[in-house]
Amino acid sequence: MAPHRHGGEYPASMSPDEPIDPTSSAGDRGSWRGHVLALAVLVGTVMLVLALWRNAYDRELVAAQAEFVVSSQDIAGRLQQRMLNCELVARGGGSLFASLARPTPTQWRAYATNMQIELRFPGMVGLGFAAYVPQSRLAGVQLDWRDSGYGMLEVWPRGLRPVYGPILYLEPRTSGNAAVIGYDMYAEPARRAAMEAAMETGTARLTAPVGLVQNAASAPPALLLYVPIYRAGDLPMTVAARRESMQGWVYVPVQMTPFVRMALRGIHQAPVFRITDVTDGVTMPVYETSGARRSESPAFFHHEVIEMYGRRWRMDFASPPLDRAAPRLRSLQNTLALGLFAALLMYAIAWVLARTEARALAIATRLTEDYRRSELRFRTAMQYSAIGKALLDGDGCIVEANQALGAIVAVSPSALVGVPFETLFEHGDGDNVSGETDENGVHRTTRRLHRGGGEPRDAHLTYAPLPGNIGQDIAGLVQVEDVTERLRAEARVHSLNRTLEARVALRTRELSLANYELETFAYSVSHDLRAPLRAIDGFSRVLAERYADRIDEDGRGYLGRVRRAAARMGELIDALLQMTRVSRSDVKPVSIDMSRLAEEVVDELRAGDPQHQPQVVIAPGMGVDGDAVLLRNLLGNLLGNAWKFTRGRSDARIEFGRQQVAGGWEFFVRDNGAGFDQVFVDKLFRPFQRLHGEEEFTGHGIGLATVKRIVERHGGTIRAVGQVGEGAAFYFVLPTG
């Protein structure tokens, strides 16, 4: 059967990818409009690309210049920091004069060697000291130098001057540095100006560029940094007092080329720069970058003026050419080309879109058919589902119902149309409707509905929001599943559970009553047993005291045995009662510091047995939640056993700590005492079971049984590990605090 053709829809034999006939007038008009639109898009995008490119170019240029300025300021800061390091080295040498009137050459050499000047401070020629010597004290200084075993101090250049500043120390001891010992730096104007400024201000001062004596005449100029040294290490308040207290200068000669190279270490591409000393308006070159290509035209210039220990330096920076100073500009050319290409591409896209308008209509038609088929699949799935389903409108009335829902309520699906969905349920059932709703708005609940001519049924309902077609009042889909038999089965299970709970409660009451009667019996027995024991002990004591002269030695021994047995029987009764109390007492959990509790127990053991002093190690900060009285009883038994079984060992050691295990912390009490055979570990925690004889170690055999009950009352476990003659360890798990 041939398909019916609607207006605007392609025949079934026609593919939506087939081209539209260009000879039609509508096609020509669409093509013309498409070309105009594509041309407008091309012009607009080209203008936009050019404007954006120019804006990006200007921003990139400004960013490159700012980066160059930051790099220049970073270099200036690095030079200041390196010069500050030189001052710190000099002041470190000056600290020797704070503890010594004047350090010896050996002490000076040791300090300079420890500083590793050549390795850590490239450019620093050495660390030296020049004395401040008025003419009247020059001869005395030379005699002291000779008497100290350093030979004759020759001060040069020769001549009479009011003040001398001869070099006494200069380390490291290279041949060049050794040759300048005795050189009077105060005689040279540039050095004297910096030395006097340092002396009068009490601060470090730098010289103008000068030639070092140890260098050749053709060597580049260097700088000297002076730090004044006053007697007693103080800083006098006035200039006159500073001259009077002046002892000399610690100074550092600096070669600028390696000094600057070290400062620039780590900078990938440093700009070309020149340093000029412009102090007092006099221009003197300090440093200039070597190997700079003068023929290249810099992209940017920048200068910084910095104060450097009394000198003013001007630093002139020149960037590389534009292609290297702002390398990202080159990528902008590619971006421009890419933008123009994108404009052409958009022109092509606009033209293609105009050509594909008709094809879009065919695609829309195909989507409409897909939607129709999807709706048909939904209808089929609803109608033939084994679960009852119904479409509801905004008022909750049934718009459409399937056969399964009609079977559940015993009404035909057609008769359900227009019926309010709520009327299907028993009167008053909706007053206490509960359920759950997920994040998608799907609501699930269980309600009771009535059937025509039948008993009520329980139904599980699932409400889901469902949009209908445009103009169609459909608000949701409800799914109805008969769960009457399942709920009845669940009710039977709940009834059995309630019966079981009643039986458990009855057995619990019976067990509690039995325990109470057992405890009452234990107290009664202990009371009844104590009276005969007191009689046995009392009459035995009377026999021993009144008839001692009539009883021979064997008889007195028998009486002693009877009294000791009675006393032990009393102790066993007390221990049994204590174990009963542990089993019956209520657990009152609080936060407890087990470390502090263990220390208190150990203090009591030391006071009771001062002759036995084992090494006791208690880990700090061990907290638990438990009953304070029961846990003290637990530690008293475990630490008391460790104390007892280590008696007699010179290297006795007891340790209380904890270790991480799966699920929490496991505490342990460990000793190196008598130990036990692991074969008999099951007997340890039984009442009145002993692995050692009474003559070896005293006890009742109740302590470890009590410990086990305390641990179990806290919901924990306990285990023991031991070896004869090497000690024992008890591990128990408690809830941590």
Image (spheres, rainbow, N blue to C red):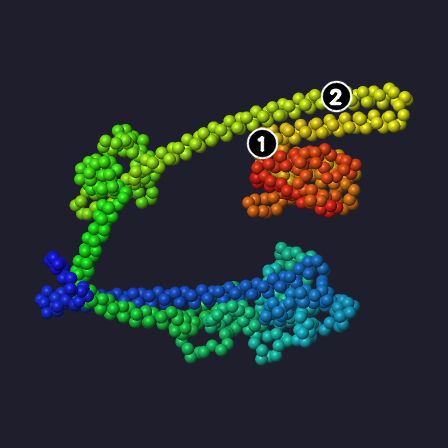
Decide if residue 704 is in sight here.
Answer: yes
Label 1 crowding class (10 Å Cα cut-off): few <14, some 14-19, many 20+?
some
Picture quadrant of residue 57: bottom left
- Going by the numbered disc 2, the residue's amino acid type is Pro
What separation in Å lies between label 1 and label 2 (alpha carbons)? 35 Å
Residue 663: image location, x then y, percent:
55, 45
Question: Which quadrant is home to the N terminus?
Answer: bottom left
* Residue position for label 2: 532
Q: Secondary structure at mark 2?
A: helix
Question: Which quadrant is home to the C terminus?
Answer: top right
* Residue position for label 1: 587
Instruction: Please report the residue visible at 34 percent of the width from the left and 39 percent of the height from the top.
Output: 436
Is 19 placed left or right of 226 in the picture?
left
Q: Is residue 586 above or below residue 182?
A: above
- Going by the numbered disc 1, the residue's amino acid type is Val
Q: Are marks 1 and 2 in contact (CB under 8 Å)?
A: no
Residue 229: image location, x then y, percent:
66, 61
Name the disc covering residue 131, or none: none
Which sits earlier in the primary sequence, circle 1 or circle 2?
2
Decide if residue 194 is in sight here.
Answer: no
Picture quadrant of residue 449: top left
Label 2 crowding class (10 Å Cα cut-off): few <14, some 14-19, many 20+?
few
Q: Is residue 574 above or below residue 675?
A: above
Q: Secondary structure at mark 1?
A: loop
Q: Nearer the viewer, residue 44 or 287?
A: 44
